């Protein structure tokens, strides 16, 4: 068994524990199922990180958003191979969004639903003076109905706004996080744009790198959207992604993005409604045609019967 903090046991694990991966585990003290994530100490993590994270987890519980997964315990586990920080979350069914992106095609309605819930969670946090700063698919839990729970809230803020770069993961960082280690709401907009791009095209727009200068060069080079093709009406969503990733003409409020996403769904609903009306009209026209044809057949049959009866009457006479 793999024990974390002498209290939590990871369920059904065969290989070594992976950092920054969400695990189903058991709280041996309270005998209940929880979710657990482990990160290793590195040079980007400040000395008072753990104490700050405890404070941030309290704020998250006070926010009480249905789109944010509550952190119920944090701690440190000293190991022979280094220092591990663990974060314990309330148990929710679902899988990480990165697993969904890797294994399935996400239809437009699912992507918009997921994005809208993420935005509502971010908006609720902002009202309490919080940003995420480490938004990526591994920190988004999705259930089979596409309900969303965001994890790792408070981690970057507890580190004085510096992303901890767990596993040297920098591919979802904004330009100013890479340049000057500054995190804000714009960082979350940028990360969401990357996530939505990945949901559609199964790849990141700027590629991947473990070198921050090279990553910045990839971002500065931009995206050739002309070489990309939207699928099943995703062209409208791509326009939103462009604005999320834009460094000049960009969104300033979460509500703006939510309204733009909603407009796509309204347009789809109107198209479906117009198709239904058209179908109904076609059915009505078909019914009228059938009635006319049947009436003509009846008139013809009646005329033939009258002629036959008249002929028989003449013969009898």
Image (cartoon, helix red, strand yellow):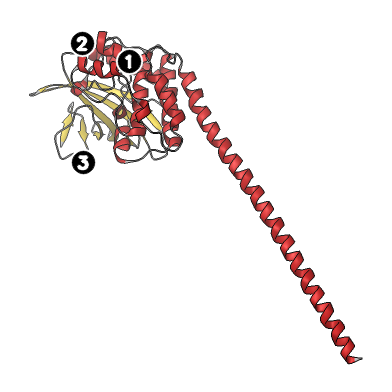
Rounded to the nearest angstrom, the CA distance separating label 1 from label 3 is 30 Å
Which residue is outermost to the left? Answer: 80
In this rendering, the answer to whether 166 lies above or below 17 is above
Q: Residue 92: where, in percent of width, then height?
A: 35, 34
Q: Which residue is mark 2?
A: 46
Crowding at mark 3 (Cα within 10 Å: few <14, some 14-19, many 20+): few
Crowding at mark 2 (Cα within 10 Å: few <14, some 14-19, many 20+): some
Is there a contact, CB below 8 Å, between mark 1 and mark 3?
A: no
Q: Residue 102: where, in percent of width, then height?
A: 29, 37
Q: Residue 193: where, in percent of width, then height?
A: 37, 23
In this rendering, the answer to whether 107 lies above or below 72 is below
Q: Which residue is mark 3?
A: 12
Which mark is nearer the camera, 2 or 3?
2
In the displayed structure, does residue 206 sit left or right of residue 278?
Answer: left
- Element under label 3? loop
Is there a contact, CB below 8 Å, between mark 2 and mark 3?
A: no
Circle count = 3
Residue name at image x 44 percent, y 38 percent: 232
Q: Earlier in the sequence, mark 1 or mark 3?
A: 3
Question: 30 or 312: which is nearer to us?
Answer: 312
In the displayed structure, does residue 242 sit left or right of residue 155?
Answer: right
Q: Quadrant of the N terminus?
A: top left
- Element under label 2? loop
Question: 287 or 98: which is nearer to us?
Answer: 287
Which mark is nearer the camera, 2 or 1?
2
Question: 1 or 222: which is nearer to us?
Answer: 222
Residue name at image x 31 percent, y 26 percent: 205
Q: Which residue is mark 1?
A: 56
Q: Earlier in the sequence, mark 2 or mark 3?
A: 3
The image quadrant of residue 220 is: top left
């Amino acid at each position: 068994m793999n024990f974390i903090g002498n209290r939590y046991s990871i369920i059904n694990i065969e290989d070594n524990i992976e950092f920054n991966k969400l695990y189903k585990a058991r709280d041996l003290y309270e005998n209940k199922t929880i979710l657990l994530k482990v990160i290793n100490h590195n040079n980007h993590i400040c000395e008072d990180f753990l104490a700050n994270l405890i404070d941030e987890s309290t704020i998250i519980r006070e926010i009480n958003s249905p789109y944010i997964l509550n952190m119920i315990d944090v701690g440190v586990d000293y190991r022979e191979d280094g220092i591990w920080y663990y974060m314990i979350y309330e148990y929710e069914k679902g899988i990480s969004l990165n697993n969904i992106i890797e294994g399935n095609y996400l239809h437009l309605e699912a992507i918009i639903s997921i994005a809208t819930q993420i935005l509502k969670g971010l908006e609720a946090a902002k009202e309490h003076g919080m940003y995420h700063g480490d938004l990526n698919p591994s920190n988004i839990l999705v259930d089979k109905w596409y309900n969303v729970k965001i994890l790792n809230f408070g981690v970057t803020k507890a580190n004085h706004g510096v992303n901890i770069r767990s596993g040297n993961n920098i591919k979802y960082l904004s330009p100013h996080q890479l340049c000057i280690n500054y995190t804000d709401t714009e960082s979350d907009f940028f990360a969401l744009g990357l996530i939505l791009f990945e949901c559609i095209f199964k790849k990141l727009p700027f590629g991947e790198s473990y070198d921050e200068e090279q990553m910045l060069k990839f971002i500065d080079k931009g995206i050739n959207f002309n070489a990309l093709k939207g699928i099943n009406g995703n062209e409208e969503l791509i326009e939103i992604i462009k604005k999320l990733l834009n460094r000049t003409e960009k969104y300033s409020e979460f509500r703006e993005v939510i309204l733009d996403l909603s407009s796509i769904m309204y347009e789809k609903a109107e198209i479906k409604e117009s198709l239904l009306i058209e179908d109904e009209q076609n059915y009505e026209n078909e019914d009228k045609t059938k009635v006319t044809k049947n009436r003509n057949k009846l008139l013809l049959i009646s005329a033939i019967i009258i002629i036959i009866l008249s002929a028989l009457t003449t013969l009898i006479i």
